[in-house]
Amino acid sequence: MSGSEFIRELPQVPTTVKLSTELKTGSWRSYRPVIDHNRCVKCLICWVYCPELSIRWDGSSVSIDYDFCKGCGICAHECPVKAVTMVPEGGGYEGGR
Ligand code: SF4
Ligand code: SF4
């Protein structure tokens, strides 16, 4: 059986598609990004890369919307000055932003 024939044989099942801006995905997180504002140079590279649009910019500082942040760590990986640290959820950093 070819790949396309195999795919056609798969049963059709109902799926739900909902934008992650509607579905609060923050509860999926096991690690939370915490920004060191003393180190942050406000370049907004984290904002560009965040797949969940969870980085907020208020015109003077960067913060994270934890209702939607899934804890993927991309912002920490891409931050050029290593201002973002991923910390375990429940580790006492819940006040971080
Ligand atoms: S990428 Fe890093 S330095 Fe740039 S705005 Fe985000 S946290 Fe700040
Ligand atoms: S951990 Fe992932 S989802 Fe959360 S703010 Fe960083 S890039 Fe966005």
Image: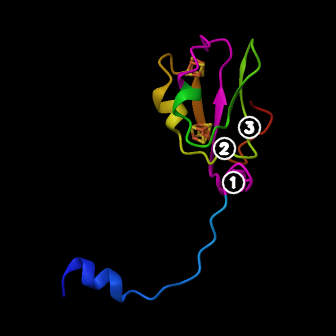
- Residue 97 lies, with reference to residue 39, above or below; the image says below
Name the residue: 76% across, 40% down.
92
Which SS type dominates the magenta stretch? Answer: loop
Decide which of 4, 67 is in the foreground and name it. Answer: 4
**In this figure, which residue is indicated by the disc labeled 1?**
25
Q: Earlier in the sequence, mark 2 or mark 1?
A: 1
Query: Residue 80 or 60: which is nearer the viewer?
Result: 60
Q: Are marks 3 and 1 in contact (CB under 8 Å)?
A: no
- The percent coordinates of residue 71 (x first, y second) are 60, 45
Is residue 24 covered in magenta? yes
- CA–CA distance in space, label 2 to label 3: 6 Å
Task: Provide the secondary structure element on which disc 1 rests.
Answer: loop
Q: Which residues are magenta?
A: 19-45
Q: Is mark 3 within 8 Å of ligand 2?
A: yes
Marks 2 and 3 in Cβ contact (< 8 Å) = yes
Mark 3 element type: loop
At horizontal 59% and vertical 81% (from top left) the residue drawn is 14
Cβ of mark 2 under 8 Å from ligand 2: the answer is: yes
Residue at 50 percent of width and 23 percent of height:
79
